[in-house]
Image (cartoon, rainbow, N blue to C red):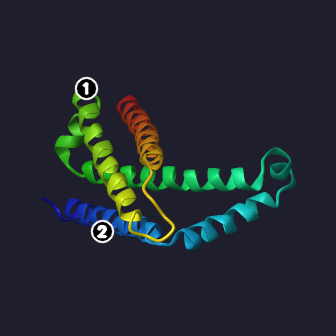
Amino acid sequence: MNLTKYLKRLIFIICILSWLVFIFGMSAKTGEESAGLSLRITRQIYKVNLVRQIIKLDTLHTIIRKCAHFTEYGILAILVLELADTFDKWKKILLQKRYVKCLWWIVIFCIIVAASDEFHQSFVPDRGPSIRDVCIDTGGSLMFLVIAVIIKICRLHRLNND
């Protein structure tokens, strides 16, 4: 294995571990701390007149919180995908049906992390596990993976046509 591939893998492993620490760190916040953080962001967005005319503050706050879940796990999925892409064997199957099977392993990993995260929240004051949040997390990982794969396939076709 050459040094560049080794460094890329190491960087992605560190990024994945750091992101997992971030995810579980956010879940370790009490319900009040977590709500306070997302409410500050929500209030900034709610200052826009158009937003206030369309949606209630509580509804926007819920949307912001769920979008955060969606995005957290989308980023996790992309980091794992990028780690997988450092392996030659993985790259060779990009346009084959086996690639989809491999992508499902990334989604399963994200589901396991999401379920573990929700279980972890059951021990945090004013927090609790939510199957709905696991579904939202899974949706984020799926959506980000689909977009990433489309981009990768477009790049591959562009390289082959040049």
For mark 1, give the secondary structure. Answer: helix
The answer to whether the residues at label 1 and label 2 have Cβ atoms under 8 Å apart is no
Q: Is residue 23 above or below residue 57?
A: below
Q: Is residue 89 above or below residue 2?
A: above
Q: Nearer the viewer, residue 17 or 13?
A: 17
Check disc 2 and report the residue beneath it: 14
Check disc 1 and report the residue beneath it: 97
Quarter placement of the N terminus: bottom left
Relative to residue 101, is residue 50 drawn left or right? Answer: right
* Nearest to N terminus: mark 1 or mark 2: 2
Which residue is found at the position 34% from the left and 52% from the top?
115
| Distance from the alpha carbon under mark 1 to that under mark 2 | 30 Å
- Is any part of residue 81 visible from this angle? no
State the mark number for residue 19.
none
Graded by Cα atoms within 10 Å as few (under 14), some (14 to 19) or many (20 or more), the crowding at tag 2 reads few
Residue 70's spot in the image, x, y percent?
50, 49
Q: Amino acid at mark 2?
A: Ile
Quarter placement of the C terminus: top left
Residue 117's spot in the image, x, y percent?
37, 59
- Is any part of residue 1 visible from this angle? yes
